[in-house]
Image: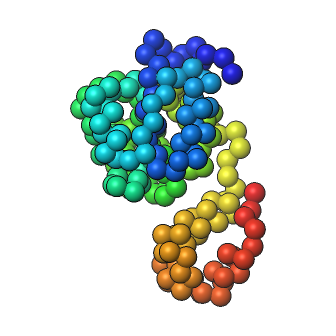
Amino acid sequence: MQDTPNIGADKSLLLVDDDEPFLRRLAKAMEKRGFEVETADSVAAGKAIATARPPAYAVIDLRLEDGNGLDVVEVLRERREDCRVVVLTGYGAIATAVAAVKIGATDYLSKPADANDITNALLVPEGDMPPPPDNPMSADRVRWEHIQRVYELCDRNVSETARRLNMHRRTLQRILAKRSPR
């Protein structure tokens, strides 16, 4: 892919995510789109980069092993008001979306978001909405992703996951035994 024409003169991009394979893939994809990428895998590393070299653009995971990605957004806003920030998360919730936007995020995307969706969100003109994703997840896939996330957070404990999701344990076992929907 060629240099994206509306990136601007400052092409610096900070990517903060603790999912190493996702971070590497996204960094490579964003470099192909013309960004000068710097990566961090924790809140502490993200804040250090944001303080030392505040970028023009940032893509930050909401939940990181050492804390909340919104802490990095706050540092970015203090150091560089014009930074365009997209918050990524596998935990899509209205309350966190509102919090992210209130402290200055440009947009909020649920994982898995691809590089095109992220680029569109970063480069959308001020006040405009980015175009909808080309291939949005189906409702069944969104449900399945949510169940998988809660299952992982409960350390793969079926009974605890079922309790938190307010569903019968056997129903959850049947869902977990199936392949993921498209």
Q: Position of residue 30 (x, y in %)?
A: 57, 29
Residue at 53 percent across and 47 percent down: it is: 20
Can residue 97 be seen in this snapshot? Answer: no
Is 124 or 66 nearer to us in this picture? 66
Q: Quadrant of the C terminus?
A: bottom right
Depth check, front residue: 154 or 99:
154
Residue 92 falls left or right of residue 55: right
Q: Is residue 63 above or below residue 162?
A: above
Residue at image position (72%, 77%) is 177
**In front here: 109 or 68?**
68
Q: Is residue 125 above or below residue 90?
A: above
Q: Give how far across and how far down residue 141 sits, in percent.
A: 68, 60
Assign the N terminus to one quadrant of the image: top right
In the rendered image, the vertical position of residue 99 relative to residue 58, given as above or below: below
Residue at x 41%, y 53% (from the top left corner): 64
Image coordinates of residue 174 in percent, x first then y, are 71, 81
User: Would you say residue 16 is visible in this rendering?
Assistant: yes
Taking 151 as reference, is 39 left or right? left
| Numbered-mark total | 0
Picture coordinates of residue 77, whole percent (x, y): 29, 33
Color style of the picture? rainbow
Residue at 55% across, 72% down: 151
* Apparent side of residue 161 relative to residue 103 in the rendered image (left or right): right
